[in-house]
Amino acid sequence: MGNRGGTRGVPPVSAAGPPAGEKDGDDVMSDKARKLFEALDLDRNGILTRDEVIIALRTKGPSLAASGDLPYWGVEDIDASSALFDAADQNGDAILTLEEFAAVVDRRFGWH
């Protein structure tokens, strides 16, 4: 009785992707993105609004940049903050989830 096309003791490779709850390496967000999101989430509800991003970057931006949690060039004016929000709001629902936010800031700030 042969092994018919497989290697004994080696589990088959699945094309279905990673197990539930795990992400592919390309989808993993940086710790910096997560930390910045939490700093900008002023009401701690797990989502960001445009006003939250603008206010938080204006008030916390310089200290976040000084601590290395935001590039200095990321601390800009209201238009730049609003443009960052628009770039991240992929589904147009006027709120940012952590995943939407991280996808943009990781790429824009070179964190991932």
Image (tube, rainbow, N blue to C red):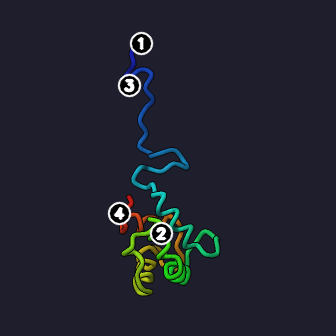
Of pointers 2 and 4, the one earlier in the residue sequence: 2
The residue tagged 4 is 110
Eye-nearest disc, 2 or 4: 4
Of pointers 2 and 3, the one earlier in the residue sequence: 3
Query: At label 1, which amino acid type do we have?
Result: Met
Give the residue drawn at x 44%, y 71%.
65
**Number of on-image labels:** 4
Query: At label 2, which amino acid type do we have?
Result: Phe
Eye-nearest disc, 2 or 3: 2
Image location of residue 62, percent across then percent down: 47, 76
Name the disc covering residue 100, or none: none
The residue tagged 2 is 101
The residue tagged 3 is 6
Neighbourhood count class around disc 2 (C-alpha, 10 Å): few under 14, some 14–19, many 20 upward: many
* Label 1 – label 3 distance at C-alpha: 13 Å
Query: At label 3, which amino acid type do we have?
Result: Gly
Q: Is residue 22 left or right of residue 83?
A: right
In-front residue for pair 2/80:
80
Query: At label 4, which amino acid type do we have?
Result: Gly
Image location of residue 55, percent across then percent down: 54, 83
Element type where label 4 sits in the image = loop
Neighbourhood count class around disc 3 (C-alpha, 10 Å): few under 14, some 14–19, many 20 upward: few
Eye-nearest disc, 2 or 1: 2
Marks 2 and 4 close (CB-CB < 8 Å): no
Task: Establish if 47 lies above or below 19.
Answer: below
The residue tagged 1 is 1
Image location of residue 35, percent across then percent down: 52, 63
Of pointers 1 and 4, the one earlier in the residue sequence: 1
Neighbourhood count class around disc 1 (C-alpha, 10 Å): few under 14, some 14–19, many 20 upward: few
